[in-house]
Amino acid sequence: MNALIKTVVEHWEFVSPVVRKPKNEDDYDALVLAVDELLEITGDDESHPLMSLVDIIGDWIEEWDHTHHPMAQASGEEVLGYMMREHGLTQSDLPGVGTQSVVSEILNGKRKLNLRQIRWLAERFNVPIDVFT
């Protein structure tokens, strides 16, 4: 047995809880805590030796989230409302969408965004067009 494998075998009992995919919410929660602690240790140092472990565990967490905690799709109108709140904008601040009353109708679900408005919003917020579709 080579030295590396021998070391792994000797320490497996202590390492294994952190290096396996989550099988339930408790495993998932433990991995999230582990990544948080590892990130405190590694800081912003992308070359830190533990970053490879952070990447592996992060992938498992992302996979679990995707499977067990799917995010609901937001409509373009909902995204617009969110972006307005985040940027501190009022309905009058979006002339490329239309008048204040047009923006109000869009936000209240009485009107849908059209392609011209979507293009303008994508450029205004510097995001891909599909964010609003």
Image: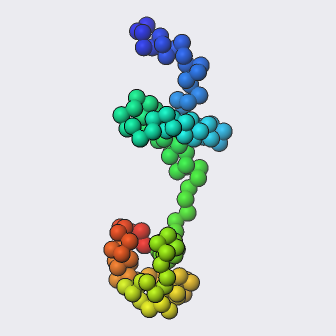
State whether residue 115 appears in this view.
no
Vertical position of residue 4 compared to residue 119: above or below: above
Count the labels in the image. Answer: 0
Q: Quadrant of the N terminus?
A: top left
The image shows residue 99 at horizontal and vertical percentages of 44, 92
The image shows residue 21 at horizontal and vertical percentages of 54, 35
When asked about the image quadrant of residue 97, the answer is: bottom left
Q: Residue at x 42, y 68 (%)?
A: 131
| Residue sitting nearer the eye, 2 or 43 | 43
Q: Which residue is at the far top?
A: 1
Q: Residue at x 52, y 87 (%)?
A: 104
| Residue sitting nearer the eye, 12 or 94 | 94
Q: Residue at x 37, y 67 (%)?
A: 127
The image shows residue 91 at horizontal and vertical percentages of 49, 85
When asked about the image quadrant of residue 4, the answer is: top left
Color theme of the render: rainbow
| Residue sitting nearer the eye, 104 or 39 | 39
Q: Relative to 126, is 34 on the left or the right?
A: right
State whether residue 10 appears in this view.
yes
Q: Residue at x 59, y 28 (%)?
A: 17
The image shows residue 8 at horizontal and vertical percentages of 49, 16
Vertical position of residue 71 compared to residue 57: above or below: below
Q: Relative to 44, is 111 on the left or the right?
A: right
Q: Quadrant of the C terminus?
A: bottom left
Vertical position of residue 59 compared to residue 123: above or below: above
Q: Which residue is at the far right?
A: 26
